[in-house]
Structure formats: C-alpha cells, structure tokens
Image (cartoon, helix red, strand yellow):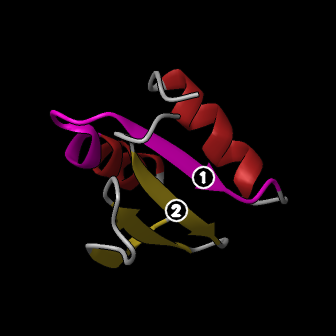
Amino acid sequence: MNQHSTVIGLDVHIERITVAILPPNAMRPEETSTIENHARAIERLVKRVTNNREAVFVYEAGPCGYALQRQLHHLGRP
C-alpha cells in the first residue's frame, strides 16, 4: 500500500458487509454503505471502488473473512 491508495474497510458478518471507503490523505471515509455478503454483491463492489484507482482492502480474518479473502484474491485483489 502506498500513500495514493484508497483503503476499503470491510466489516464482515454472515449476511451483510459494512463498507467504508477512505481516499488517499483523507481523515474520514468518503462513503459508507452496507452490501449483502454474497459473491455478486462483492464483485460489484470491487469493480465499482477500484475503477481508475489503486485500492487496498482491509478486513478481519475471522470466520466470515476467510471466504471474502478467497473471493478478493480470485478477483485479483489479494
């Protein structure tokens, strides 16, 4: 991650994921939202938030985070 990366924070739960998008050099997220914890919703999120910007995804490594990690890796976002 470098100082020009947008940070995408993900709070993962069984049914939903809370998303916070922090642009480079910002003190607060520019957007917060909630999506369903389903493969299609995650794929749409990744495409939307990485369009024309470098992004880093952060999330907990608990029981709900492992499936998300595998999907992000599959989408080219390790």
Q: Secondary structure at mark 1?
A: strand
Can you give x and y, in whole percent of width and height, for residue 64 in the image? Answer: 74, 60
Q: Is residue 20 above or below residue 78?
A: below
Which is nearer the eye, 1 or 11?
1
Q: Residue at 36% across / 55% down in the picture?
A: 41
Q: Are marks 2 and 1 in contact (CB under 8 Å)?
A: yes
Q: Tell me: residue 20, above or below residue 40.
A: below
Residue type at numbered disc 1: Val
Q: In which quarter of the view is residue 51 placed? A: top left
In the rendered structure, the answer to whether residue 70 lies left or right of residue 37 reads: right
Q: Position of residue 35 (x, y in %)?
A: 39, 70
User: What amino acid does circle 2 point to?
Assistant: Gly
Identify which residue, 18 or 15, lies in the foreground: 18
Q: Regarding mark 2 in the picture, which secondary structure is present there?
A: strand
Residue under numbered circle 1? 58
Give the Cα distance between marks 2 and 1: 5 Å
Image position, residue 60 (x, y; %): 74, 59
Mark 2 = which residue? 9
Q: Is residue 47 above or below residue 14?
A: above
Question: Does the magenta portion include 60?
Answer: yes
Give, as a single range, the part of the protein colored magenta. Answer: 47-61
User: Is residue 66 rendered to the left or right of residue 56?
Assistant: right
